[in-house]
Image (cartoon, rainbow, N blue to C red):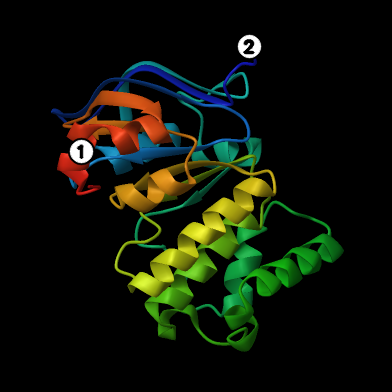
Amino acid sequence: MEQPLLELEGVSAAYGSVVVLRGVSLNVRRGEVVALLGANGAGKTTLIKSILNLVRVTSGRITFNGHSLRGMKADRIHALGIGVIPEGKRLFPKMTVLENLRMGAHLVRDEKVIQERIEEAMERFPRLRERAHQLAGTMSGGEQSMLAIARGLMSRPQLLLMDEPSFGLAPVLVDRIFEVVADINREGTTVLLVEQNAWQSLQVAHRGYVLQKGEVIMSGTAEDLRENTEVQRAYLLA
């Protein structure tokens, strides 16, 4: 069987003396969308930060494409092929749409390639073309979400970590975000999708894990999790 693209084995992580993740094991295989579900405070964002070495990992193993990520600097992890759309979007508010997109391609040296990727981003999100010279901080929440995803794709990551991409959006925009997740996966990008929106996450995911109080309490195919009565009860899927 092919080695997972991303694998966490027995990962624990802490902020100071406060342990947030406890022995988490999960994997993401190339070509998948894997959903990581859990309530607020379950440790989902900490897991993303653990992968990126932005929080103290106290035990366990994290590997990506055969490389150990523990102790590796975040910029090196990005260069290996991991992109991230962080919680809260984290755009550069005083930069324009175009400038934000260019920041997403900071590892690309070929100007022609950068221009091609900007054009692809604007084809995917026509609103960004209309807002190309607008400051990101003055855009609507939905437009900022589009820009955050487009910027995250500018580096052509093998694996895209998406942390609560639908948070705070109107329902019609939430639908669009999940359509985009499915689209980019069909185009070849592997996705680890961290979401509270369990129902729609499990519509686009192949598999999923449920995180509770820093521990994986359940995993399975998306269909298995959708039909699981505990998941239905906890995440209002029924």
Q: Is residue 151 visible?
A: yes
Which quadrant of the structure image shows residue 216?
Answer: top left
Q: Secondary structure at mark 1?
A: loop
Residue nearer the viewer, 65 or 127: 127
- For label 1, the crowd category at 10 Å Cα-Cα, with few meaning under 14, some 14 to 19 and many 20 or more, is some
Can I make out residue 91 in this image?
no
Relative to 144, is 188 on the left or the right? right
Q: Residue at x 86, y 65 (%)?
A: 112
Side of 174 relative to 111 (left or right):
left
Quarter of the image for the N terminus: give it. top right
The amino acid type found where label 2 is placed reads: Met
Residue picked out by circle 2: 1
Q: CA distance from mark 1 to mark 2?
A: 31 Å
Q: Pick the residue in front: 112 or 124.
A: 124
Q: Does residue 89 sit above or below 160 in this rendering?
A: below
The circle on residue 118 is none
Few, some or many C-alpha atoms within 10 Å of disc 2 (few <14, some 14-19, many ≥20)? Answer: few
| Quarter assignment of residue 8 | top left
Q: Residue at x 24, y 37 (%)?
A: 43
The residue at 40%/35% (across/down) is 223
Specify the amino acid type for callout 1: Ala
Which residue is found at the position 62% from the left and 18% from the top?
A: 66
Q: Tell me residue 213's x, y (percent).
A: 16, 31
- Disc 1 to disc 2: CB gap under 8 Å: no
Residue 25, percent across and down?
Answer: 36, 19
Considering the numbered disc 2 on the image, is that residue within a helix, a strand or a loop? loop
In this view, 138 is above or below 157: below
Residue 201, position in %: x, y?
Answer: 39, 48
Count every numbered label the image shows and give the total. 2
What residue is pinned by disc 1? 42
Q: Is residue 166 above or below residue 107?
A: below
Upstream in sequence: badge 1 or badge 2: 2
